[in-house]
Image: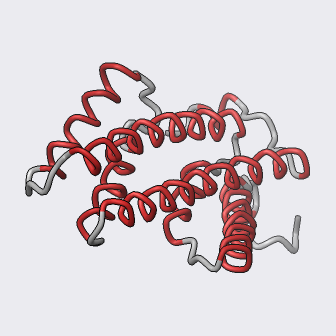
Amino acid sequence: MKDVPSFLKGADWVGVHFALNIFIATTILWLVLRLAAGLAPIWALSSIIAASDPNVKQATRTFWGRIINALLGCITGMVFLLLGGTSDWKLPTSLAVTVLLSVYVVRVPVMWRQAPITAALIIAAGLTHHTRLTAAEVGLRRVGEVMLGCIVGLVVSWLASKVWPLPEPTDHAATKG
């Protein structure tokens, strides 16, 4: 321990573990989407970060919350996109309805914000494309990228926990803020 820099003495490696998870998951996703589908994985990157966690139990909770709320947002967004007309009120109304459904019907509080974010992705596609069919296609592709990001983030977190398991937290670590 004499040669170890002082800032590394007694350090936990959670941050390094998390950074490595993000690096590996981002690389995999970038290669898969860029090489296999010719897409830039911009929409999937936030999902990787949200679904990656050095603690696999937390990563799993986030994954399921994100998936369930993303599906709700996708369905709500598609309904408003296809049936909502051309009103300027379509976006704020669809987001508010999505939040209400997420909070009071679906009731999966982990990643509640994902539902309106996903609905916004779908509706935004409708605002930037001239036909509803093109908008629906673009919106669904974006949601698919988000879902793929969640899956890659969870799988990498799980694999990393098998290859490099984190030590069980001590009472001292649990009381740190």
User: x%, y% of residue 159?
Assistant: 84, 49
In the foreground, 126 or 92: 126
Please tell me which residue is depicted at 73% across the width and 79% down the height of the picture: 35
User: x%, y% of residue 49?
Assistant: 57, 57
User: x%, y% of residue 29?
Assistant: 69, 67
In the foreground, 20 or 37: 37
In the foreground, 81 or 41: 81
* Image coloring type: secondary structure
Please tell me which residue is depicted at 78% across the width and 34% down the height of the picture: 168
Q: Quadrant of the N terminus?
A: bottom right
**Left or right relative to 2: residue 89:** left
Q: Quadrant of residue 20?
A: bottom right
Please tell me whether residue 78 is drawn above or below residue 136 in the rendered image: above
Please tell me whether residue 166 is drawn above or below residue 36 in the rendered image: above
Please tell me which residue is depicted at 87% across the width and 69% down the height of the picture: 2
Please tell me whether residue 26 is drawn above or below residue 87 in the rendered image: below
Q: Quadrant of residue 101?
A: top left
